[in-house]
Image (cartoon, rainbow, N blue to C red):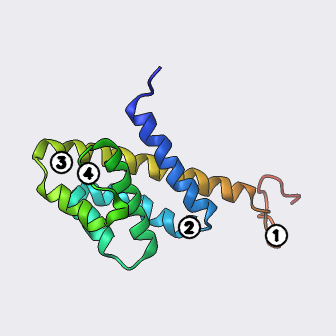
Amino acid sequence: MARRIDVEIGARAWEAAHKAHTNGDLAVYRSRAVELATMLQQSGLTQTLSYLASRNDANQRKVAFDLANELRLHLSDAPDPNDGLGACVAFLLNTDEATRSMASVRAALFADWLKRAVETLKHDQEQSAPNDQSQPAEVGAPGSLR
């Protein structure tokens, strides 16, 4: 049975977030990934990808790469981001409106899933971290003896 397209996009967003987590880059990658949905909504796909690709920040470029890679999987003519993010931006600038609209919808889905994935990983990371017992519990707080 074929999976729905949004579930497939979610799986790839989870893979991208988990890779950042495994590499120890989750904190900074997370801040860039959380911004992605807003950037897409405010500036559109082509400008957002162009902006992220032009940054010197490795995590911004990583988010741009992950986004471009996701688009390549849906758009048969889209270039491989390994060949350069500039080629991906040029493709979006030179493609027809219908393709660009479809790519924008897929990008928005990917951004939403990516945000959920990095937030979940952050939450899991916080839950598994040892609790800092050096601070006294607030009076009347659950679990306090006061």
Q: Amino acid at mark 1?
A: Pro
Alpha carbon distance from label 1 to label 3:
55 Å
- Residue 47 % position (x, y): 21, 64
- Residue 44 % position (x, y): 21, 57
Q: Residue furthest top?
A: 1
Q: Earlier in the sequence, mark 2 or mark 1?
A: 2
Q: Amino acid at mark 3?
A: Arg
Q: Is 96 left or right of 6, judged from the image as shown?
A: left
Q: Earlier in the sequence, mark 3 or mark 2?
A: 2
Could you tell me which residue is drawn at 14 percent across and 59 percent down? 93
- Element class at badge 1: loop
Alpha carbon distance from label 3 to label 4:
11 Å
Q: Amino acid at mark 2?
A: Ala
Q: Is 119 left or right of 131, judged from the image as shown?
A: left
Q: Is 104 left or right of 8, judged from the image as shown?
A: left
Would you say the residues marked 1 and 4 are in contact, meaning their CB atoms lie under 8 Å apart?
Answer: no
Would you say the residues marked 4 and 2 are in contact, meaning their CB atoms lie under 8 Å apart?
Answer: no
Residue nearest the observer in this picture, 71 or 28: 71
Q: Which residue is mark 3?
A: 100
Q: Amino acid at mark 4?
A: Ala
Could you tell me which residue is drawn at 11 percent across and 46 percent down? 97
Q: Earlier in the sequence, mark 1 or mark 3?
A: 3
| Quarter of the view holding residue 73 | top left
Q: Earlier in the sequence, mark 1 or mark 4?
A: 4
Q: Which residue is mark 1?
A: 136
Is 103 above or below relative to 88?
A: above
Residue nearest the observer in this picture, 9 or 78: 78
Q: Which residue is mark 2?
A: 27
